[in-house]
Image: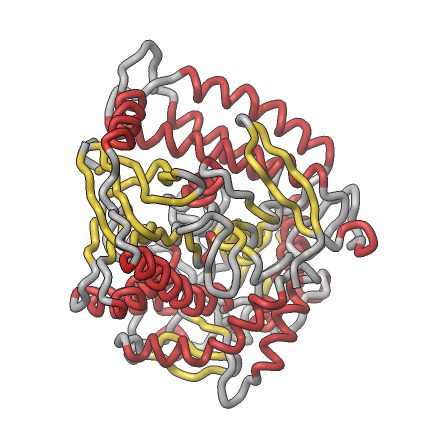
Amino acid sequence: MEVFSTDILIIGSGLAGVVAALESERSGLQTLLLGKFGIGMGTNSSIANGGFTTANSRFSKEDHLRMTLDTGKGLNVVSLVKSMVEQGPEAMNCLRSHGVQLVESAVGYWVDRPEGSSDLPGILLMGALAERLKRSATRHLPGFVVFDLVVEESEVRGAFGFSREGKPFLIQSKAVILAAGGAGGIYRRNDNQRTIRGDGYAMALRAGLPLYDLEFVQFYPLVLAEPRLSTFMLYPPYPKEIRLFNEKGEDLQERLDIPEDLNLAIMNQRDRVSIALYEACQKNDVYLDLTRTPEKAWGQYPLNFLKRSKFPFRERPFLIAPAVHFFMGGIEIDDRGRTALTGLFAAGEAAWGIHGANRVGGNALTECAVFGTLAGRSAAEHAGTKRKEGETILPSEAAIKRWERKAREHLKKRRGAFEHSRDLYRDLKELTWKCAGPIREEGSINEGIDRLAFLEEKIESVYPATLKDLFRKRELENMALLLKALLKGSLLRQESRGSFYRKDFPDQDDPRWLKSSCYRLMNGEFLVTHRALPR
């Protein structure tokens, strides 16, 4: 087994992870950044639309705070929201200093694009940061898959996993930043990168940390649903000539009372618009029509991005339907990015508390920029203190032997086959969409719990024959773990709030449910409790 040591370990190479690395390097401490792929690649940051919602000359901090809290329906951690709002403008200055080109918008900033460019803003964003990272002292190791956090004496000491070549590794560190993203990829319909399957959540749960509000999953209303085409969101801003209608030709914006300004509705009413369109899709096909858009608009982003496809978006309407976009739940942090586990910090979609029951469009990237910086700074302070105290970061012989045994257990050849792994992926994703989708109710949730128990047995009974199988099995285990939490939490919350909609409890119930769900993993099962929010 290969053993590394570093002062600060960052898991995740999207915006939050890279910003954390650039901040922590200021301390002069050794920083190691792990990712499954290259910087930004395979992360949602690289396919983001590049909008940062934050105060500027046209949008006040008071307006940003009010919009975020209104959209969160009472479940935001207000102190964290205030930190994001207050520090958002400075985070934009920091991104500029790293080479990211930003232009002011009505409610924040957009990643600037060269005239006529059809590149996704996320690619431009992460490309600029990757160039900056090359000039830093941060060490980047792509192709490493973390299986577990190393916890000793109630403190995080590093991480364990495998390289893409199948070599087990143990990384010992004084501080760990978890920035591994969300879990949209566990759903059949999602607009995330396919690798976003809850790895960070699963690591935190297995390390003994609770997660919060996992049942709150944001759906994006306008996602391509044409057969044989990729499931991707139709990026805003939308032209005023856009039309939404069903196969009967009925105008759905009027019929479903969707605001005329679709861009504003998508920004702060995604929950209501998604549920309305999902219900409409259950009755008839729903189409989006861009054929009335002026020729000039097709030479500008985002419509010029669609021109890359052979599909005739300009000539005819096309099918759309809501899809999973973002997880509001995650790991509890404070306003410095610290978790309840000593030595562990978190940032980005892996963290919880900012968005409440639903997220304002553009707050995800702002959250990454602000709390990535805070986590990097706090991790450096923590690691620096340990260095001053003379604490060694080399693992003990006993620790190495313990993790070597775990590695052998993962790699051990046993009876069983893995040829049905694709079926298991498909079955889990279909089950998640069916039973924990935009509209949930007791009967389908209980059906999902029963079906999941059967799938868990199938996952447990098959063993990897190849390295690809090894990683697939861990992904399946993570997916099943998150789905179990989703289903149990959805069953217990008997109301509708923000992105969470129970058909059998359609109203928001503040007297009984103005509180957050707390998920703990106890001997393989979830204990779900509820608590009033910290303010």
Q: Is residue 46 visible?
A: no
Side of 257 relative to 54 (left or right): right
* Residue 531 x/y as whole percent: 70, 49
Q: Is residue 14 left or right of residue 132?
A: right
Percent x, y of residue 351:
49, 55
Please indicate whether residue 345 sits to the left or right of residue 285 in the image: left
Q: Is residue 327 above or below residue 418?
A: below
Display colour scheme = secondary structure
Query: Residue at the top extreme?
Result: 415
Circle count: 0
Asked if residue 403 is positioned above or below residue 344 in the image, the reply reads above
Residue 390 visible (yes or no): yes
The residue at 48%/79% (across/down) is: 108
Front-most of 163 and 501?
163
Near-viewer residue (136 or 299): 136
Across and down, in percent, residue 254 comes to 71, 66
Which quadrant of the figure contains the C terminus?
bottom right
Q: Residue 244 occupies which quadrant of the picture? A: bottom right
Q: Position of residue 274 (x, y in %)?
A: 62, 55
Quarter occupied by residue 1 = top left
Front residue of 282/341: it is 341
Tell me which residue sits at (26%, 22%) in the image.
Answer: 408
Residue drawn at x 31%, y 20% is 409
Q: Nearer the viewer, residue 39 or 440?
A: 39
Residue at coordinates 20% horizontally, 43% vertically from top-left? 4
Q: Furthest-right residue in view?
A: 511
Residue that extends furthest to the bottom in the rendered view of this protein: 57
